[in-house]
Image (spheres, grey):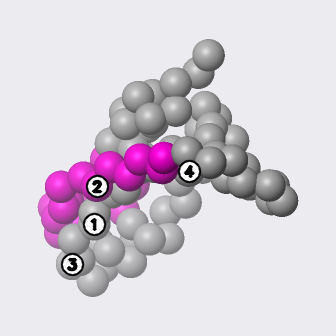
């Protein structure tokens, strides 16, 4: 996905986490600013990675877990990949 564009959060991982009672750790990064999807050339720079607190999937439905992860990641992306 291009920086500044929101992707689709597929529910498969959330379904698996809820049904296994696993914890989910959301991660956001800005690598797309330097390493374009499918791009041959990579630009130099610093990739910033933010790791969120674990989310207990047992207290969620797959839909609410997916929404919680999406909200956390998208909240970080506005800072990591600001739209000019």
Q: Which mark is residue 70?
A: none
Q: Is residue 69 visible?
A: no
Q: Residue under label 4, please give it.
A: 31
Residue drawn at (18%, 55%) of the image? 53
Could you give the CA–CA distance between mark 1 and mark 3, rounded to whole angstroms? 10 Å
Tell which circle, 2 or 3, labels the residue nearer the N-terminal end.
3
Q: Nearer the viewer, residue 14 or 80?
A: 80
Residue drawn at (45%, 28%) of the image? 78
Instruction: Indicate the position of residue 10 as horizontal and vertical percent values.
Output: 55, 60
Tell which circle, 1 or 4, labels the residue nearer the N-terminal end.
1
Instruction: Indicate the position of residue 63 as horizontal and vertical percent values.
Output: 39, 55
Q: Within the magenta stretch, is there residue 54?
A: yes
Q: Secondary structure at mark 2?
A: strand
Q: Which mark is residue 24?
A: 1
Tell which circle, 4 or 2, labels the residue nearer the N-terminal end.
4
Residue drawn at (50%, 70%) of the image? 12
Q: Nearer the viewer, mark 4 or mark 3?
A: 4
Could you give the CA–CA distance between mark 2 and mark 1, rounded to whole angstroms? 11 Å
Q: Residue under label 3, please give it.
A: 21
- The reply to whether discs 2 and 1 touch (Cβ–Cβ < 8 Å) is no
State the image quarter where residue 58 is shown.
bottom left
Q: Residues within 10 Å of mark 3 (few under 14, many from 20)?
A: some
Q: Secondary structure at mark 3?
A: loop
Q: Nearer the viewer, mark 1 or mark 3?
A: 1
Q: Residues within 10 Å of mark 2 (few under 14, many from 20)?
A: few
Q: Residue under label 2, please give it.
A: 51
Q: Read off the magenta span.
A: 46-68
């Amino acid at each position: 996905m291009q920086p500044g564009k929101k992707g689709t959060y597929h529910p498969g991982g959330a379904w698996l986490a809820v049904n296994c009672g696993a914890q989910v750790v959301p991660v956001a990064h800005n690598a797309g600013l330097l390493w374009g999807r499918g791009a041959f050339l990579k630009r130099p720079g610093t990739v910033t990675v933010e790791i969120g607190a674990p989310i207990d999937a047992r207290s969620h439905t797959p839909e609410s877990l997916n929404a919680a992860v999406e909200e956390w990641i998208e909240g970080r992306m506005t800072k990591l990949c600001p739209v000019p």
